[in-house]
Every structure is written in C-alpha cells, then in structure tokens.
Image (tube, grey):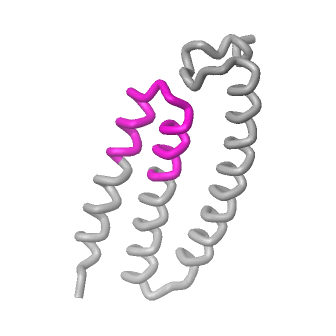
Amino acid sequence: MVTIPAFLIVAVVLFGIGTVGVMISRNIIILFMCVELMLNAANLALIAFSRALNVVDGHVIVFLVLTVAAAEAAVGLAMVITIYRNRETMNIDRFSILKW
C-alpha cells in the first residue's frame, strides 16, 4: 500500500514542474497545460488527505476543481484559437491585445 507522504511527494513534484513551466514558458498552450498540471497536483494532495482522514469532503472538492478546470480549458482554448487567428502567433510576448 502506498503511504500518504508518497502521494504528497508526487503532488509537490507535479506542482513544482507546473510552476516552472508557467514561469519559463512563452507558448500559451504549454502555459495552459502547466496550469492544468498544477491543478491536478492539488487534486492529488486533496485526495491523499481525504483518504488519510477518512472523509469524503476532499473527493467532493476534487470533483468541483475538475469541473472548473474543464471549463477553464474550454474557454481558454477558445480564446487561444481566436487570438491565434488574429495574430498568427502563440508567443505570449507578442499579444498586445491583452495590454490595457
């Protein structure tokens, strides 16, 4: 049986990879993938704590986070496609449309 610290170590590593990806990536698709990776790492930690405490609350929160992540991915991808059609680039630094 896998212990709770092992799950948490995997969650921290996944969250760290996602954070580094968000910090250094200039491609908006990779940026969205890294944000999804960070959300999944948080979900893994919630499930680990939920199983350790024998409560169902963590499972419910994970279900809600997955729902929000799916909506974020759909809306974000629609925005990326629209911006790509107008600007023909995926580089975040080239998006002057997002500036005030």
In the image shown, does 88 or 74 lie closer to the viewer?
88
Residue nearest the viewer, comparing 18 with 79: 79
Describe residue 99's horizontal placement relative to residue 15 as left or right. right
Number of marks drawn: 0
Q: Residue sitting at 29 percent across and 53 percent down?
A: 13
Query: On the picture, is 28 further left or further right than 41?
Result: right
28 shown above or below 64: above
Residue sitting at x 53%, y 74%: 58
**Which residue is rendered at x = 24% and y = 81% of the image?**
2
Residue 14 position, x and y percent, is 34, 53
Locate residue 50, reporting x and y percent.
45, 78
Give the position of the C terminus as an image quadrant: top right
Segment colored magenta? 16-37
Magenta span has 24?
A: yes
Task: Judge left or right: residue 27 versus residue 64.
Answer: left
Q: Characterize the magenta stretch by its predominant secondary structure.
A: helix
* Magenta region includes residue 22: yes
For the residue pair 33 and 39, the one nearer the viewer reads as: 33
The quadrant where residue 66 appears = bottom right
